[in-house]
Image (tube, helix red, strand yellow):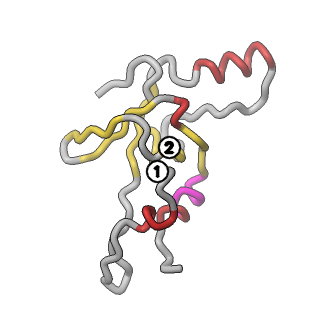
């Protein structure tokens, strides 16, 4: 699979459904929020985030939201299309669906259920 146009290809995090003690809890992120999903960018189309790069270049707007490959991102929950390839779910979405760029620590803390 190769990203085209403005496509952003994200590998959604698989949420742990079982605690360390072996208790099944379902998808913990569903309990935290039904408005977003978290994943890692695996590919960007050649035009992805072109508007943001243009704003930075022409208007000197510093630090626009421009995701790069391997970044952890917060996406709108029902954005894009989920595709299953070789047993792995991949989400294809647009730059407007990327709500925030997260550090690895932030991404992992949002996807780990603590039982609280």
Residue found at the far bottom of this picture: 21
Residue 82 x/y as whole percent:
31, 40
Q: Are marks 2 and 1 in contact (CB under 8 Å)?
A: yes
> For the residues marked 2 and 1, what is the alpha-carbon distance in whole angstroms?
6 Å
Q: Can you give x and y, in whole percent of width and height, for residue 111 in the image? A: 48, 62
* Image quarter of the N terminus: top left
* Overall secondary structure of the magenta section: helix
Q: Residue furthest top?
A: 58
- Between residues 104 and 52, which one lies in front from this camera angle? 52
The image quarter in which residue 58 lies: top right
* Residue 46 point in image, percent of width and height: 47, 18
Q: Identify the element where label 1 is drawn.
A: strand
108 shown above or below 9: below
**Residue bearing mark 2:** 76
In the rendered image, which quarter is residue 30 located in? Answer: bottom left
Q: Is residue 96 above or below residue 77?
A: above
Sort mark 2 into few (<14), some (14-19) or many (20+) by Cα contacts within 10 Å. some
- Nearer-the-camera pick, 43 or 15: 15
Q: Which residues are magenta?
A: 103-108
The label on residue 37 is 1
Q: Earlier in the sequence, mark 2 or mark 1?
A: 1
- Magenta highlight on residue 107: yes
Q: What residue is at 58 percent from the left and 41 percent from the top?
A: 99
- The residue drawn where x is 53% and y is 62% is 110
Residue positioned 51% across, 60% down in the render: 33
- Give neighbour class at mark 1: few <14, some 14-19, many 20+ (Cα, 10 Å): many
Is disc 2 placed on a helix, strand or loop?
Answer: strand
- What residue is drawn where x is 41% and y is 40%? 10
Q: Position of residue 39 (x, y in %)?
A: 45, 48
Number of labels in the image equals 2
């Amino acid at each position: 699979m190769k990203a085209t146009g403005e496509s952003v290809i994200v590998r959604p995090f698989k949420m742990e459904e079982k605690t360390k003690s072996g208790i099944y809890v379902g998808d913990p992120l569903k309990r935290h929020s039904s408005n977003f999903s978290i994943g890692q960018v695996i590919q960007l189309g050649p035009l992805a985030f072109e508007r943001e790069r243009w704003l930075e270049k022409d208007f000197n707007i510093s630090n626009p939201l421009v995701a790069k490959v391997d970044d952890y991102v917060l996406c709108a929950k029902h954005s894009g299309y989920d595709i299953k390839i070789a047993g792995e779910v991949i989400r294809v979405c647009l730059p407007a669906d990327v709500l925030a760029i997260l550090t690895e620590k932030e991404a992992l803390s949002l996807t780990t259920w603590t039982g609280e």
